[in-house]
Image (spheres, rainbow, N blue to C red):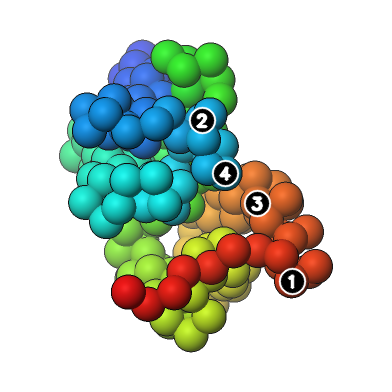
């Protein structure tokens, strides 16, 4: 039985508002770090926080961003949503991260939040995407390259796993948005100018 429309609307709103919480900004304030929107790459994400504040700050940011995607999907599924309504909740959380209401609609690039969504929505696909990121990052030590490769893999896996149309559409939409948010990184990668990380 389909969930009532009002429930779907409330959960979409909840997902967007939760997604709008900018983990990087809150972590930076709590640890008295520079505002990631004004320093480093200017991106409020875990990679920039790593450069500005180290591994602990980056881990907290990464966890916060992943939970913003994971929690709304789990809550919506637990309350009976499936199909397009569930996909809408997941997308709302992601759009909240990209365009946060509380922070002037200036958000991050969405990799960690998308991963949280996938881990809750299709755990096996999410784990495959995470493994792809880890392997590529361990090989080249460039976070954006790992993110781009993992993002390109995700829709292929969605089709390979024969997911329902709402899930395929969600994964493809997330991938397109993540790629769009990484267009400057892609340009630098093509020019050989994208910064990486050296083993400490």
Q: Nearer the viewer, mark 4 or mark 3?
A: 4
Q: Is residue 117 visible?
A: no
Dot placed on the residue nearer the N-terminal end, 2 or 1 = 2
Dot placed on the residue nearer the N-terminal end, 4 or 3 = 4
Q: Position of residue 137 (x, y in %)?
A: 46, 75
Disc 3 packing (10 Å; few <14; some 14–19; many ≥20): some
Residue annotated with mark 2:
37
Dot placed on the residue nearer the N-terminal end, 1 or 3 = 3
Residue annotated with mark 4:
41
Q: Position of residue 108 (x, y in %)?
A: 51, 38
Dot placed on the residue nearer the N-terminal end, 2 or 3 = 2
Q: CA distance from mark 1 to mark 3?
A: 15 Å
Looking at the picture, does residue 112 appear above or below residue 156?
above
Residue 192 disc label: 1
Disc 4 packing (10 Å; few <14; some 14–19; many ≥20): some
For image coordinates 60% across by 50% down, the residue present is 178
Dot placed on the residue nearer the N-terminal end, 1 or 4 = 4
Looking at the picture, does residue 59 appear above or below residue 40?
below
Q: Quadrant of the N terminus?
A: top left
Disc 2 packing (10 Å; few <14; some 14–19; many ≥20): some
Q: Quadrant of the C terminus?
A: bottom left
Q: CA distance from mark 2 to mark 3?
A: 16 Å
> Callout 1: helix, strand or loop?
loop
Q: Position of residue 8 (x, y in %)?
A: 37, 24
> Callout 2: helix, strand or loop?
loop
Q: Is residue 135 visible?
A: yes
For image coordinates 50% across by 64% down, the residue present is 143
Q: Are marks 4 and 3 in contact (CB under 8 Å)?
A: no
Residue annotated with mark 3:
182
Q: CA distance from mark 2 to mark 4?
A: 8 Å
Q: Position of residue 90 (x, y in %)?
A: 42, 39
């Amino acid at each position: 039985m389909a969930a009532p429309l009002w429930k779907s609307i409330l959960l979409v709103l909840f997902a967007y508002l939760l997604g709008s919480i900018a983990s990087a900004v809150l972590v930076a304030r709590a640890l008295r770090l520079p505002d990631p929107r004004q320093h480093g790459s200017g991106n409020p994400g875990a990679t920039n926080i790593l450069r500005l504040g180290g591994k602990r700050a980056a881990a907290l940011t990464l966890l916060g961003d992943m939970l913003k995607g994971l929690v709304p999907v789990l809550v919506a599924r637990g309350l009976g949503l499936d199909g397009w309504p569930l996909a809408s909740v997941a997308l709302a959380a992601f759009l909240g991260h990209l365009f946060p209401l509380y922070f002037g609609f200036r958000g991050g690039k969405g990799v960690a939040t998308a991963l949280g969504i996938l881990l809750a929505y299709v755990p096996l696909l999410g784990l495959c995407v995470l493994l792809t990121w880890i392997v590529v990052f361990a090989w080249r030590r460039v976070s954006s390259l790992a993110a781009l490769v993992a993002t390109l893999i995700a829709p292929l896996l969605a089709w390979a796993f024969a997911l329902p149309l709402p899930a395929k559409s969600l994964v493809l939409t997330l991938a397109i948005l993540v790629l769009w948010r990484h267009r400057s990184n892609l340009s630098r990668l093509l020019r050989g100018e994208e910064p990486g990380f050296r083993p400490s």
